[in-house]
Amino acid sequence: MNNAHPLKRLYNFIFDPLDKWLLVCLLIVYIMSLFLLYSADGQDLGQLNNKSLHTILGFTLIWGLAKAKPQFLANFAVPLYVIGVILLIGVEIPGLGVKVNGATRWLNLGITRIQPSEIMKIAVPMMLAWYFQKHDLTLNWRNFIVAIVLILIPCFLILKQPDLGTTLLIAASGIFILFFAGLSWKVIIASIISFILAIPVMWLYVMKDYQKIRVLTLIDPMQDRQGAGYHIIQSMIAIGSGGVWGKGWLNGTQTHLDYIPESTTDFIFAVYAEEFGLIGNILLLLVYLVILGRGFVIANRAPTLYGRLLSAALTMTLFCYAFVNMGMVSGILPVVGVPLPLVSYGGTATLSIMFIIGLLMGIANHRR
């Protein structure tokens, strides 16, 4: 190794810690997202430059996490979880919480704003994986009760913002951990039945009016074409008009006539589908499926319970984010405000996804 060419040593230093399958998928999605964001933002370079900065920071984060030992990072699970909960409480404090589009989800730190719920995407699965590894030899039903409480605390705080979409997805990441930790099928089936039976109660006493409208709009968006159904109708028109091959880059009429709402964030998939068509959609889905498959391979090869639980749960969480975003833009799921992983604009969201990828690469790099 010492006799290798300096450039070869530099290459090995940079790329050896990185999982090649995940790295190739990241590069494909990133390059595609640059072209897409340029088109969605009206050919303006503002958000494009910001996303490039976020991505550079993200790749640096990935490299650092890939070099770090997973068991070392497990020591930060509890502090990260506690800090995340404190920040979520801070969002509720007047003067600190920042309201955007009617929801108080951001925390004003003076020099910048952060979205604490993005931190909990990482903190919840890390905390649960650490907890189950700690009690691996004495695991019983009490441990699962404690784990459920650890899931419910941040979910309750995020639901108050309100942010139902992120609440459900963070809850899902915790449920994945419970499943992979060996939760009984009887309990899972009983929970599903209980949830179904509780839907009428949730509809009457828990769900807010705007959430009920989203569900009703999903069933029939045409009942309020200019109001609640506008977003879904316009995104479905964009997806349908793209056809098989798409209209071509920068040629999306729905996009450039500003019919698609939140075209650079939540509904960027509609922009992509209009310009690149069904073929483009299939290619993007294949990239996400490769990430899913590679994540499960990493989980299967992980030498510790912490690594197996964390990598499997993070992989499923990442895929769920992609599935929910595509589903809501396509009109098969309610609109819940979930960005498309690695594609949508947003600094905190981008870094949180990069953190997930970095953890997966770290587990893969240290599987020996």
Image: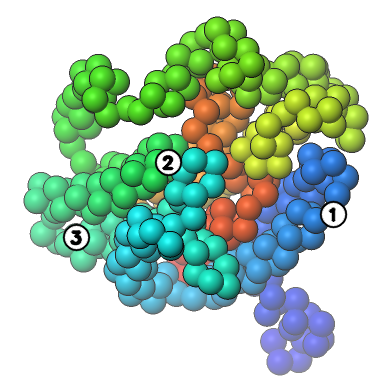
Distance of label 2 from label 1 (alpha carbons) = 30 Å
Task: Report the side of 314 relative to 241 (left or right).
Answer: left
Which residue occupies the extreme bottom position in the image? 2
State yes or no: discs 2 and 3 in contact (Cβ < 8 Å).
no
Distance of label 2 from label 3 (alpha carbons) = 33 Å
Residue topped by disc 2: 163
Mark with earlier residue (1, 3): 1
Task: Report the side of 176 relative to 201 (left or right).
Answer: right
**In what element is the residue under mark 3?**
helix
Percent across and percent down for residue 308 are: 37, 55
Which mark, by number, is residue 136? Answer: 3
Residue 83 in sight in this render: yes
Which residue occupies the extreme front position in the image? 95
Distance of label 1 from label 3 (alpha carbons) = 51 Å
Percent across and percent down for residue 208 are: 35, 28
Give the residue type at disc 1: Leu
56 is higher (above) or lower (below) than 286: below
Mark with earlier residue (2, 3): 3
Residue topped by disc 1: 45
Percent across and percent down for residue 127 are: 31, 61
Residue located at (44% from left, 37% from top): 165
The image quadrant where one finds the N terminus is bottom right
Depth order, front residue of 75/367: 75
